Amino acid sequence: MKAAYIHQPGPPESIVYGELPNPQPTGAQVLVKVAAVSVNPVDTYVRSGAVAWSLPLPFIVGCDLAGTVEAVGPDVSRFKPRDRVWGSNQGLLGRQGTFAEYAAVEEQWLYRTPPGVSDRDAAATALVGITAHLGLFRDAKLRRGETLFVHGGSGGVGSTVLQMAKAVGAGVITTAGSEEKAEICRRLGADLVIRYKTEDVGEAVQRFAPGGVHVWWETLREPDLDRAVQHLALRGRLILMAGREARPPFPVGPFYVKDCSAHGFAMFNAPPDEQRRAADDVNRWLAEGKLRPRISRVMRLAETAAAHRLQEESTIHKSGGLAGKIVLEP
Ligand SMILES: NC(=O)c1ccc[n+]([C@@H]2O[C@H](COP(=O)([O-])OP(=O)(O)OC[C@H]3O[C@@H](n4cnc5c(N)ncnc54)[C@H](OP(=O)(O)O)[C@@H]3O)[C@@H](O)[C@H]2O)c1
């Protein structure tokens, strides 16, 4: 089969697109014929070695996938050939990745793709959908009528957090780096979009939510926690999930006197049952059209190195070149 893989961590150019043996499903593994995959920033951290997990070599990059069941291992009970499935959480913690024509995935990380939902959309929603759900509902316990702030409402995580918050009846404040991205956020349902390059974010949040926001979801890799805590309401919840190198000052006084809480998480730590609960809602909202994945670019699997470069330029070097996910197809 064709696959995008590395022999050792390195720059995007270390990704080889070439032939590897087809995987054979054993135990509770499902062999998926991959129709679409999507890039996440963490794919680039694993590929570069910034996240130092011991990798199966050659290591196929990537976490997300969508496609059709080709064959199943002897212990598989949930799926059969020709079922349409999507999944995430591969290529992490030493598991093999998904950027190939076929992937053997433990059935506990796979979910049925709802009828009418495309493989592109399922792949684009996978990791960001589970991430947004865990942070919003397991951790922040967002409720109808509350107000949430999230940076980057047209980004991979931001656009998903925005839509899920709207799906449960919360108000959403978000930011955008251009008018085009602001328009994307409005179309996704944002109640207030702040053009952070020309407007004062703090002032705009204060005007819209004078009593503070109930949930501040921080997607920035260098978060300003002074500002975040300043705009949290009484019993506000702060979600921290980006910026491995970040060591910002933390405003203890303003935080505790408002009974606030902070929740840090990485989606890959969530056990299969927690990820499945998230995936069930993702599927329902995809089927109902309440969750519309933001696909910024569609590329060929052969272009994986270029896709990694583009993701790094946009997310890490802040080129602003993307407004959502990169999807690749074999
Ligand atoms: N903990 C976890 O489980 C988990 C899961 C997924 C992702 N992550 C992390 O979350 C981060 C975001 O991932 P992603 O996939 O959403 O990346 P992304 O699609 O590149 O989105 C990043 C967003 O940040 C916005 N942004 C950048 N600088 C900004 C600034 N100064 N002010 C306001 N907004 C700014 C961008 O908005 P504009 O384009 O409008 O400038 C963009 O929408 C990454 O660091 C990733 O590693 C963590």
Image: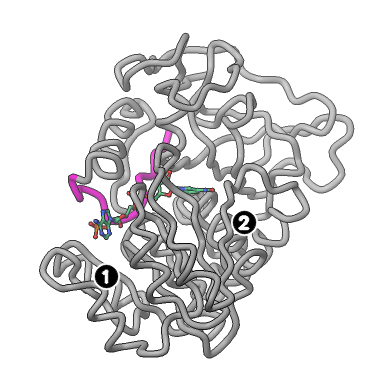
Q: Residue at x 53, y 83 (%)?
A: 234
The answer to whether 319 appears left or right of 138 in the picture is left
Secondary structure under tag 1 reads helix
Q: Is mark 2 within 8 Å of ligand 1?
A: no
Looking at numbered disc 1 in the image, what kind of residue is underneath it?
A: Ile
Above or below for 309 versus 225: above
Q: Residue at x 59, y 76 (%)?
A: 259
Secondary structure under tag 2 reads loop
Foreground of the two, 74 or 178: 178
Q: Residue at x 58, y 67 (%)?
A: 261
The answer to whether 67 appears left or right of 163 in the picture is right
Is 285 colored magenta in this rendering? no
Give me the C-alpha separation between circle 2 and circle 1: 25 Å
Q: Is mark 1 within 8 Å of ligand 1?
A: no
Return the residue found at the far front.
Answer: 253
Which of the colour schemes (rainbow, by chain, secondary structure, one colour) is used? Answer: one colour
Look at mark 1 in the image and give the residue it sits on. 184
Above or below for 18 versus 192: above
Question: In the rendered view of the protein, which quadrant contains the C terminus?
Answer: top left
Residue 18 picture location, percent across and down: 42, 14
Look at mark 2 in the image and give the residue it sits on. 113
**Magenta region, residue range:** 319-330
Classify 10 Å Cα crowding around label 1: few (below 14), some (14-19), many (20 and above).
many
Residue 143 picture location, percent across and down: 60, 82
Residue 5 picture location, percent across and down: 46, 18
Residue 283 is labelled as none
Above or below for 118 versus 180: above
Return the residue found at the far left.
Answer: 198
Instruction: Mark 2 and mark 1 in contact? Answer it, CB < 8 Å.
Output: no
Is 329 colored magenta in this rendering? yes
Looking at numbered disc 2 in the image, what kind of residue is underneath it?
A: Thr
